Amino acid sequence: MTGAITFPDADLDVDPNQPYLNCNSNPMQGLKVAIGPLRDVQVGAVLNISWEGFEDKESTKPVKGTLNSVTHFVTEDDREKGFVVKIGDYFQHLKPIRSGWGKASYTINGAGIIDASLRVYLIYPSGDFCDEVTD
């Protein structure tokens, strides 16, 4: 079985069944995506990992400018433990989503797609973004 995608910094206090990227998740540090372990994947395999923001839960209305991708080569350690990669910059790939959804996905050597969605809510009730409010 190929490794699942999780979001290590996601806030699960809002809904334990739906991870949230919100101001409590410290999104200004970027988006971290955890993948694996990848027990059935060959060392050296190429993972193309992508992130994109959407206006809707069904991922049919992309938020312009939020698409980003990184490439990762599988190591023996990834097979045993998985890995975490930072894929999104707050100002470019997260903040434009405002209140919507994001989807992380990856392919292994260009085949098949594994994905996971994340609720994104980066605005306080006052209308201010996470980076505009200081405690």
Image: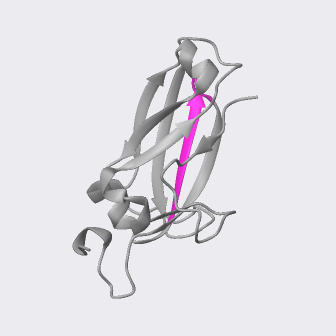
Q: Nearer the viewer, residue 45 or 82?
A: 82
Image quadrant where one finds the C terminus: bottom left
Q: What is the residue that sits farthest to the front in this orientation?
A: 135
- Residue at image x 52%, y 15%? 75
Q: Nearer the viewer, residue 63 or 122?
A: 122
Q: Is residue 65 visible?
A: no
Is residue 79 toward the left or the right of residue 74 in the image?
A: right
Residue 1 on image: x %, y %:
76, 28
Residue 58 on image: x %, y %:
63, 64
Vertical comparison of 93 with 40: above or below: below
Is residue 106 toward the left or the right of residue 67 in the image?
A: right
Q: Nearer the viewer, residue 100 or 20?
A: 20
Residue 110 is a magenta residue: yes
Q: Is residue 50 visible?
A: yes
Q: What is the residue that sits farthest to the bottom in this orientation?
A: 126
Residue 115 is a magenta residue: no
Part of the protein shown in magenta = 101-111
- Residue at image x 35%, y 55%? 93
Vertical comparison of 51 with 97: above or below: above
**What is the tally of numbered marks visible in this picture?**
0
The main secondary structure of the magenta stretch is strand
